[in-house]
Amino acid sequence: MAITTEALLEQPSAAVDQPCFHCGLPVPAGARYAAVIDGRRQPMCCRGCEAVAEAIAAAGLTDFYRHRTAPSRRAEDLIPEPLRGLELYDRPDLQQGFVRVESEHARDAALIIEGIVCAACVWLNERHVSRLPGVLEFRINYSTHRASVRWDPRQIRLSEILAAVAAIGYIAHPFDPRRQEALQQRERTVALRRLAVAGLGSMQVMMLAVGLYAGDFYGMDEWVRAFLRWTCLILTVPVVAYSARPFYQGAWRDLRRQQLGMDVPVTLAIVTAFAASVWYSWKGGGEVYYDSVTMFVFFLLAGRFLEMTARHRAGQISEALVRMLPASATRLDDEGREQIVPVAELAPGDRVVVRPGETLPADGRVVEGASSVDESLLTGESLPLPR
């Protein structure tokens, strides 16, 4: 049995220091939420705890409160960390900074997708998000990891799109040049650290492997062979456990989505070769592949690092084009008077004044005057062109 909130409006409010019967947190001053548990009126801190307690009481499961060993978790405690706060991006005042209104029923925004490591990640995100009702278009630039999304606000909210991306193991947030630069720096630092561990490990293991290869031709005592194998095992563990972790994470993400990406066979090869080597080191005899495992991880990480460097460089060129756009423009009104307005407020049909040395604020047609325009970043032409 439970008492609804409406029936308690006339009841005195709970004491400030009285804990919530459901979650154990203090009841805010003036709160009038409560539920009847086993014939006794128990205070609640919020409508969420009250609703849960009423549902438990209505189902006849109040023994839960007698036998529990700790207060229940609040509903927001059950929300994964990456999903908390996504509803903030649905606020119109916050969307003014990164959402463009195309029409009454169409919105456009630029996002950054974290966690992309290959073209298959791009394909998975585009396919998953594009299937959501209300998403009109979703495209990802692999070089910059920037996504362009168009949606119908009547059918879906932006927070639901961000949550859908998080559901498949990636993190999406509005594009911010400063945050993107910090993410790229962190990505580069982590990649260098993993590459360094793999490089040092592979060099040491290869030196010991030369001794094992020579022993096959010139003979070697069994205890020396066992010593070299166990030393190779110790040196290989950091490479397999730390440097190769991105491959495991990518493989697990693909398997959860019932997809076979490039990380799945890579992980299978690393784990299989390492497990077989450990087995033969323990039992004696057979062949070990510690050198193959470490070099395989090192070369894959080196290739990804070079690809990441090229991708960041391409993204920096794109960002340079964006930074060249001025923040404001000189617009002419109907009477020919000049007004300084933000570039974002320019609309088709506006007339703007561009003085010598200034940057063109938008694409348009020259209606009066003549000058030379530097279009080298767009066309590759080194000389200014008359316009």
Image (cartoon, rainbow, N blue to C red):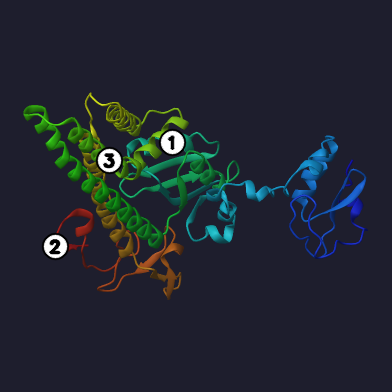
Foreground pick, 12 / 63: 63
**Disc 2 to disc 3, how far (Cα)?**
56 Å
Which of the two marks, 2 or 3, is nearer to us in this view?
3
> Which residue position holds label 2?
383
> Which residue position holds label 3?
236
Q: What's the amino acid at mark 2?
A: Leu
**Disc 3 to disc 1, how far (Cα)?**
25 Å
Outermost residue toward the left in this view: 218
Locate residue 300: give its quadrant. top left
- First along the sequence among labels 2 and 1: 1
Q: Is residue 279 left or right of residue 168?
A: left
Foreground pick, 240 / 190: 240
- First along the sequence among labels 3 and 1: 3
Q: Is residue 102 left or right of residue 216?
A: right
Which of the two marks, 3 or 1, is nearer to us in this view?
3
> Which residue position holds label 1?
253
